[in-house]
Amino acid sequence: MADSTSPVTVQVGLGERSYPIRIAAGILDRVGEDLRKRSLARRYCVISDDYVADLYGERLMRSLAGAGITAGLLSFARGEESKNLQTIAELASALARQGYDRGDGLIALGGGVTGDITGFLASIYMRGIPFVQVPTTLLAQVDSSVGGKTGVDIPEGKNLVGTFYQPRAVYIDTDCLATLPGRELLGGLAEVIKYGVIRDAGFFDYLESQREAVLALDSDAVSRVIARCCEIKARVVEEDEREGGLRRILNFGHTLGHAIEAASRFRIIHGLAIAMGMRAAADLAVRGGMLAAGDAARIRALLEAYGMPVVVPPELDRQEIRSYLQTDKKTVAGRVFFVLPEAIGRVCITDAVRPEDIDAVLDSD
């Protein structure tokens, strides 16, 4: 294994819109130097939530200043509640007042909410300006910072207003995970397990055998996990950038997971809702005759071994969960599509799921 301070680079190959994902401990201090070499923008505005801005904002600003890059910083209130059109309008107005124009760029510093907000803002401000991702949570590092999906929530559902807009680079500092709250780490690990189920049985095996090292944030194990997730996502995005077909497999666990998350009023964080959704999807696949019960048991066992919840809380309104399913982005002409495993490492996309089976997996323990 390479020295964890030496960047590992995963390339997302999208022709003229290709970009690197650079992964290393301490890379936050080298973002300015790398951006200076890339000459993507005249100046930058760092966008962050108030919590991450306090943790890492000054450090990133020093990195930019040390490379001779002019930059400002704007922050918003932490949490999914800020992922809305009002926040976008407020940030856009602040950029305009400070004179940011089409020659400037944005830097998303934070988790998935920050990346979604910043990417969406970059895609529409001045009809599109460049942005880069500096994800600080595991979930953002392995999933939401890669692939160009941006968006905000509206009362009718999560991520219903957004764009496909690729970043120009992604900088992943594994040291940032040391300050990540425990449940946020678990939320990211749910997305990590997802990649093993949908695309790589060998990676699933690795997560089973190296659980203690991963949970202890061993540098080699964490770097390997993040790099493999980014490789899988990069290859999928290269084949299907705008989710017309293959890319939909990345939504394993998300159909029910998003509905659970919304029905909880986001008290259940994204990754943990996805863990519940993955267990439910595996059970749906068994009920539909697609997946062996033993594989479903392995999926559940791995989620539980990492300390994730797999049972939908009984206090959540089941009718409300079913209602949110109908407004999910993956619903077409009233047909709700699920990503269901056929084996560990292989999934399919189907709408052949019976309502009574959905009811059963929501209530099963």
Image (cartoon, rainbow, N blue to C red):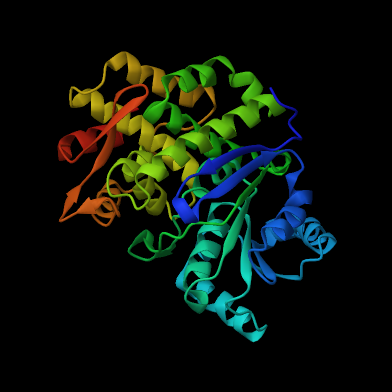
Indicate the position of residue 244 as horizontal and vertical percent values: 28, 49
Is residue 1 rendered to the left or right of residue 339? Answer: right
Q: Is residue 256 visible?
A: no
Is residue 44 rendered to the left or right of residue 131? Answer: right
Look at the picture and state if 27 lies above or below 77. above
Residue at figure coordinates x 40%, y 36% from the top left = 276
Is residue 336 rendered to the left or right of residue 166? Answer: left
Front position in the image: 69 or 90: 69
Indicate the position of residue 157 as horizontal and vertical percent values: 35, 60
> Quadrant where the C terminus lies?
top left
Residue at figure coordinates x 45%, y 39% from the top left = 233
Indicate the position of residue 285 as horizontal and vertical percent values: 24, 27
Is residue 281 rendered to the left or right of residue 191? Answer: left
Indicate the position of residue 70 as horizontal and vertical percent values: 76, 70
Residue at figure coordinates x 43%, y 38% from the top left = 235
Residue at figure coordinates x 44%, y 62% from the top left = 151
Look at the picture and state if 180 lies above or below 150. above
Front position in the image: 294 or 267: 294
